[in-house]
Image (cartoon, rainbow, N blue to C red):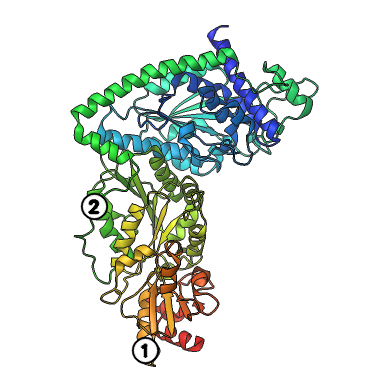
Amino acid sequence: MNSKQLMTRAADNIRILAASMVEKANSGHPGGAMGGADFINVLFSEFLVYDPKDPQWTGRDRFFLDPGHMSPMLYSALCLQGKFTLEDLKQFRQWGSVTPGHPERDLARGIENTSGPLGQGHVFGAGAAVAEKFLEARLGKEVMQHKIYAYISDGGVEEEISQGAGRLAGLLKLNNLIMFYDSNGIQLSTECKDVMKEDTAAKYKAWGWNVVTINGNDPDEIRKALQDAQQEKEKPTLIIGKTIMGKGALKEDGSSFENSIKTHGAPFGGQSYVNTIKNLGGDPENPFQIFPEVQELYAKRQEELVKIVAERRAQEAAWAKANPEKAALKDEWFSGKAPAIDFSQLVQKEGSATRAASAACLSVLAEQVPNMICASADLSNSDKTDGFLKKTHALTADDFSGAFFQAGVAELTMACMCIGMMLHGGVVSACGTFFVFSDYMKPAVRMAALMEVPVKFIWTHDAFRVGEDGPTHEPVEQEAQIRLMEKLKNHHGRNSVLVFRPADADETTVCWRLAMENVSTPTALILSRQNITKLPEGTNYEAAARGAYIVAGSDPDFDVILLASGSEVSTLVAGAELLRKDGIGVRVVSVPSEGLFRSQDADYQEAVLPKGAKIFGLTAGLPVNLEGLVGANGKVFGLESFGFSAPYKVLDEKLGFTAENVYNQVKAML
């Protein structure tokens, strides 16, 4: 058996395993996995560098799968590497198995990213490539010489997010990024020609990519393309592999089942499955096998990797000895621990907008967290991420020593690339835009929550007080949406997203500190455009770390609790003064994070919001934002319509967000 025959035999082994996984589960997508088997086999058996003994070695190559429905291909290839057992493959898509329908991040088993929503996976890869370049500029080539591989499909190219990845990867000359496009022309319900007519190669070339088109089922052509891509000095590489959907598949009558829509998203079934497995050289009665010659191929690669990794680690050790300070930084950055930050010298300007207070915090972070990357979707001077930018400069194709990522007007792309940076490891990422545009980012926020990636989302212009820009730019329902995610628990029992909406400048400092300390989940900071009156003197801002707390000046004996987050808290403070003139005792409670508050012990929750207390909630969003805290004994005053175009102080008056209306609403409630 010559080399090409052996490589095809190994790819056929992957095809057999992939088709059999889907068949046994009676659920899944066999066709694409079978078409992509040749590429994944060449990459994994000849090119991908990883440490068989240490799956989290920082010097490893990264592989990002975009079409998560092709998980049978990935699991099968990883099985050949020894990271999954044949029994694991047999449990595909079953309860409690390590082989779910779409891959979920599992570094111990070689899975770098959760994938499913098409398009996001390869943008994670682009973000990882940025992180590698960023770290190389700070640490050196000796410890940052790996490659980032990404695998995309026709669906990923069609998803709009691919435009952002293509534009930015080309702009930044990410020559460490090598992407394989599995171009089989078949989708779940149509052929690609029915929905797209474009020259994909020309499009990527226009973005500044190195593009090569090959027979994606020919191991020799795949090998040559990967070799050339590894030598590319100036551009990211796109390998367009023309592949066969359902390669090797046969119908019940023995005729070809290749290039059929029917093989994309369903098991073959019956005699068609039997014929397919036989055609690929497998045993339909015992399909879950690794052929001896394939086992030998991957064992040989393991031996090669031992030598390759030993050489790389020796380089790293020599580098560490010559650069002890950088080595210490590298260990710290990749530890995943929260960076040490000192905000003690930060004095916030009284009465400033919380976006401006955030800028002051970002200024400190830019100086104290050298592995932090901050991004903005063309709004740095409005979302005030320029507080970070002023202490560094934008990273560019020719200079990755900067730490600010100018993403352009592409909120979803920006969010996914920031996630990819953190999936790579060694960096902390944050990204900013207007809160109303968080709608564009929700799929990425959800993926960050699923993967427990602690990206910091900075959302400013948090309410109808955006004012003159009108309803298109005034978030009303957005806080309710992100608060729903705050209530959702991840698999470790934590709030899937930690959400903060600070009440003034000083509370913003505490919220930023908590955000940086949160290394387990994404954090959202929701910030005001307009200036906010400082909370009463003596307020214990450190109590914000418990999610909700009593504001200074509250009455020990109270008749009603006034509760809010963000700028509405100062409105409640003003309303409380009017109520006290009528002899009504008032407690004011700031709730920057309901999720954090709900995680406190029952005694603390009862101390802040006693059961049976009458509570009035004020929110610049939907009333549902506070209904869970206010309860049946109280009332929430909020918005139940989109906003309007007018100066924000006029909107406060017209919409009832004034001390006088707080007084009127509470009097009516009591």
The residue at the far right in this view is 253
Location of residue 210 (image quadrant): top left
| Residue farthest top in this picture | 1
Mark 1 neighbour class, 10 Å CA radius: few under 14, some 14 to 19, many 20 or more: some
Q: Secondary structure at mark 2?
A: loop
User: Viewer-proximal residue, 40 or 467?
Assistant: 40
Q: Residue furthest front?
A: 603
Towards the viewer: 298 or 543: 543
Q: Residue furthest bottom?
A: 582
Q: Quadrant of residue 136?
A: top left
Q: Nearer the viewer, residue 396 or 292?
A: 292
Q: Earlier in the sequence, mark 2 or mark 1?
A: 2
Q: Is residue 153 left or right of residue 249?
A: left
Does the image show residue 561? yes
Residue name at image x 39 percent, y 93 percent: 582
Q: Secondary structure at mark 1?
A: helix
Left or right? Give the position of 27 relative to 477. Answer: right
Of the 4 image quadrants, the one containing the N terminus is top right
Residue 277: x, y in percent? 70, 21
Residue 459 x/y as whole percent:
40, 59
**Residue 169 at x, y percent in the picture:** 40, 37
**In the rendering, at what x and y percent does residue 320 appear?**
23, 29
Q: Is residue 323 left or right of residue 128?
A: left
Cα gap from disc 2 to disc 1, whole angstroms: 45 Å
User: Which residue is labeled 2 in the image?
Assistant: 390
Considering only vertical position in the picture, is 34 above or below 430?
above
Tell me the kind of residue under disc 2.
Lys
Which mark lies nearer to you, 2 or 1? 1
**Label drawn at residue 466:** none
**Mark drawn on residue 580:** 1
User: Which three-letter amino acid code belongs to the residue tagged 1?
Assistant: Arg
Tell me if I can see residue 220 in this picture. no
